[in-house]
Amino acid sequence: MKSSADEHKPVDTFANEQAGDTLPPKDRRFAVLASSLLSSQTKEFVTRGATQRLRENGLLTADAINKVDEEIIKKLIYPVGFYTRKANNLKKIANICLVKYDGDIPSSIEELLLLPGVGPKIAHLVMIVGWNNVQGICVDTHVHRICNRLEWVSRSGSKQKTLTPEETRKALQRWLPKEEWVPINPLLVGFGRAICTPLRPHCGKCSVSRFCPSEFKETSSPSSKANKFTFNNKS
């Protein structure tokens, strides 16, 4: 499906992989962290635009972010989701990185998770892209949704769907070979945006629908509180 459909190609890569790719290693890692923070609950093209504006203004290093006024950051990253909060978090993160890590970023999942605004998804993504260190699977809403639709994961000790991306990550890591932990995210993100969408997935266009227990069901995201299913007759 990937090789035959151009629509997958723009979304089949980590959005943060090129962030600060011309910078020295320490600054590049901070750029990856900043871009990852901006990408949360934001479309990829919006994140790219915000990251580019920060780059053009020399604001992709901890030192530069720490010195600049927060209002300038807000204007440059708008309209990313929760841009006001993210601008504030970027200032806090920059200060922490300067004080504790000499301008670099933390090199462990545990330390990354202590940074404001950084959750498991961002922490694992930064470890993979920033440090080339695979500590776990990067699970976003697409991976979470599709893994539940395919019944690849379930809550510990039951057959119930996982309720959060973090539950999905732990369940998926229990059986997925480690060499697949990195490629599973871009593979399913592209698939989730183009075919296996949150509502009314395009099962008729899906080449692997015959393997899917949720084929031709309209469903909200597994994380939704409603979790209601409507069954349609197959044509």
Image: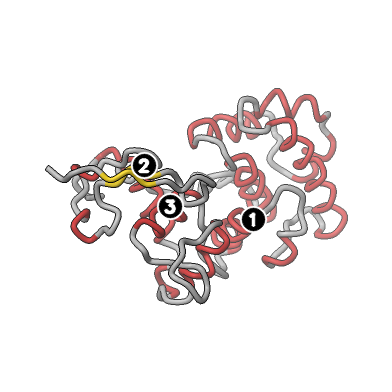
Give the farthest residue toward the left: 235
Q: Amino acid at mark 3?
A: Arg
Residues 212 and 30: in front is 212
Please count the marks in the image.
3
Which residue appears at 42% of the width and 46% of the height?
228
Residue corresponding to mark 2? 197
Q: Report, in whole angstroms, how far the alpha carbon at label 1 lies from the one at label 2.
A: 36 Å
Q: Is the Cβ of the residue at disc 3 closer than 8 Å to that at disc 2?
A: no
Residue corresponding to mark 1? 25
Mark 3 is surrounded, within 10 Å at the Cα level, by few (under 14), some (14 to 19) or many (20 or more) other residues, namely many
Q: Position of residue 66 (x, y in %)?
A: 83, 40
Mark 2 is surrounded, within 10 Å at the Cα level, by few (under 14), some (14 to 19) or many (20 or more) other residues, namely many
Which residue appears at 65% of the width and 51% of the height?
24
Mark 3: secondary structure: helix
Q: Position of residue 92 (x, y in %)?
A: 82, 45
Q: Report, in whole angstroms, how far the alpha carbon at label 1 lies from the one at label 3.
A: 34 Å
Dot 3 or dot 2, earlier in sequence: 3
Image height of 55 relative to 206, above or below: above
Q: Position of residue 222 (x, y in %)?
A: 47, 51
Image height of 127 relative to 23, above or below: below
Mark 1: secondary structure: helix
Mark 1 is surrounded, within 10 Å at the Cα level, by few (under 14), some (14 to 19) or many (20 or more) other residues, namely some
Say whether residue 113 is left or right of residue 100: left
Which residue appears at 36% of the width and 42% of the height?
197
Q: Position of residue 63 (x, y in %)?
A: 80, 43
Give the farthest residue toward the right: 99
**Image mark for residue 145:** 3
Dot 1 or dot 2, earlier in sequence: 1
